[in-house]
Image: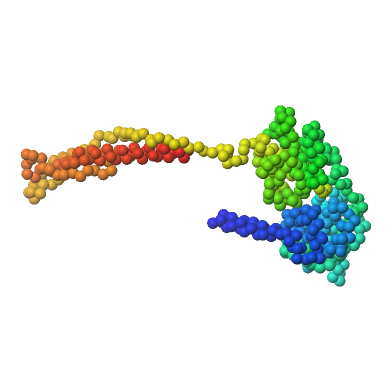
Amino acid sequence: MASLHYVLLFLALSASATSVSSHNITEMLAPFPEYSQFNSFLTQTKLADEINSRQTITILTLNNAAMSALTAKHPLSVIKAALSLLVLLDYFDSTNLHQISKGTTLCTTLYQTTGTASGNFGFVNITDLQGGKVGLGSAAPGSKLDSFYVKSVKQIPYNISVLEISGPIITPGLLTGTPPSASDVNITAALENAGCKTFAGLLQGSGVIKTYESAVEKGLTIFAPNDGAFKADGVPDLNKLTSAVVVSLLQFHAAPNYNPLGSLKISKDPIPTLATNGAGKFGLSATTAGNEVTLHTGVDSSRVANTIIDSQPLVIFSVDKVLLPVELFGKSSSPAAAPAFVSFPSPAPAPVRVSFPSPAPAPVYVSSPSPSASPTTTPSPTPVMVEAPSPLVASPPARSTKTPAGAPAGAPTVLENSTAGKGAALHVGYSSLFAFLVTATVLCSFLMD
């Protein structure tokens, strides 16, 4: 009973967690036209996917006027960095925003998790200025509180909160140090610096690097195995593979679109790769546990370890294992080719004769008093032998009583089998039925095994 109680409690908590984490930031902002530009850029930069994949989060939104000033002068990569600094990895609403312990706190932002923020430049300083005013600014030393809390927009308590602030939060180098565009990134150099030299060498040696570079402009996601992945058990000897197989394998490690980590976390559809040449062919699937994403190929699975580069429209991840497509290194996933038990029709079973030795029947002595005996004289009983029924007979056949010819009056009555022929036939019938049951049992046991 206690175990059942814990199971039910676990299911209830799981259902609660599922319902709590189900939010959609673009749908939450849709009824507010004053935030339409902010909402649009969350979708364009795919920050919306990252926001929707997290359970406890606060969005500091900007109205259209503030967004216009930001977007008019900067490329999409800079806009994404600036907006990711407005995504706090904690829950704040209008109440607890004015009840900050000691009046000030530093909060981690999504920008800090990208790995591109140096030091504590990815943190936001939130300070209660009293009188109902709350200031926000970069946590970098010497930064000012140059943005202020305006109003609460919408909340799902302790899950997601949307608050309007007066302007973007600017951390040093965020706007002036424009990161290089994706087309300027040296992919092989970035892979080598991240510990993926073997993979980079394969790309160059096979010429697949040119395929990668030509796909960057429209969006490219690379899953690069680290050097240790090529030494793991189960990885095929690449020197023994044909050039065509190596090319398909390398193309399988890249998707022809921009899929940052947040998008992978909420991905439910198959992920096509550069090797995909038809519906459902050379595709990947992704599952999420907490903040960890695992890729599945149909042959094996691999954890997405780190983000090497995230500069829209290019993102490069390092993975723990070489991704082996089922089309090259596994059996066909179609049900027809899957291992199955095949049954062949068998002929009707031949009768099985089973004989059991029965012991010799023990004599049974029955005393039958004579009805005409004198009350003062008790004659000595005459032993009468009665055959014990065979163990295979369900019930003894009917017996008839008969007085032996020439016996004196008062002699014991001998029980005699008056249906010997019928009893023998009945015995044969039961034996056949028993043999059939034994045969059926043996066949059933064989089929079940």
Camera-side residue of 224 and 110: 224
Q: Is residue 441 left or right of residue 374?
A: right
Which residue is located at x 81 percent, y 63 percent? Answer: 35
- Measured along the vertical axis of the image, is residue 47 above or below residue 231? below
Where residue 38 sits: x, y (%)? 81, 60
Q: Going by the picture, which residue comes out furthest to the top?
A: 240
**Residue at x-position 66% and y-position 38%:** 326
Residue in the image at 68% along x and 42% along y: 278
Residue 238 to residue 264: above or below: above
Q: How is the image coloured?
A: rainbow
Q: Closest to the observer: 401 or 32?
A: 32
Residue 118 as seen in the image, left or right of residue 96: right
Residue at position x 83%, y 54% from top?
Answer: 80
Residue 142 lies, in percent from the top left, at 93, 57
* In-front residue for pair 162/368: 162
Residue 126, compared with residue 173, is above or below; it is below
Residue 24: x percent and y percent? 72, 59
Q: Where's residue 84, x and y in %?
A: 82, 55
Q: Is residue 238 visible?
A: no
Name, please, the residue furthest toward the bottom. Answer: 131
User: Total marks drawn?
Assistant: 0
Asked which quadrant contains residue 63, the reply is bottom right
| Quadrant where the N terminus is found in the figure | bottom right
Residue 220 appears in the rendering: yes
Residue 232 figure quarter: top right
In the foreground, 106 or 93: 93
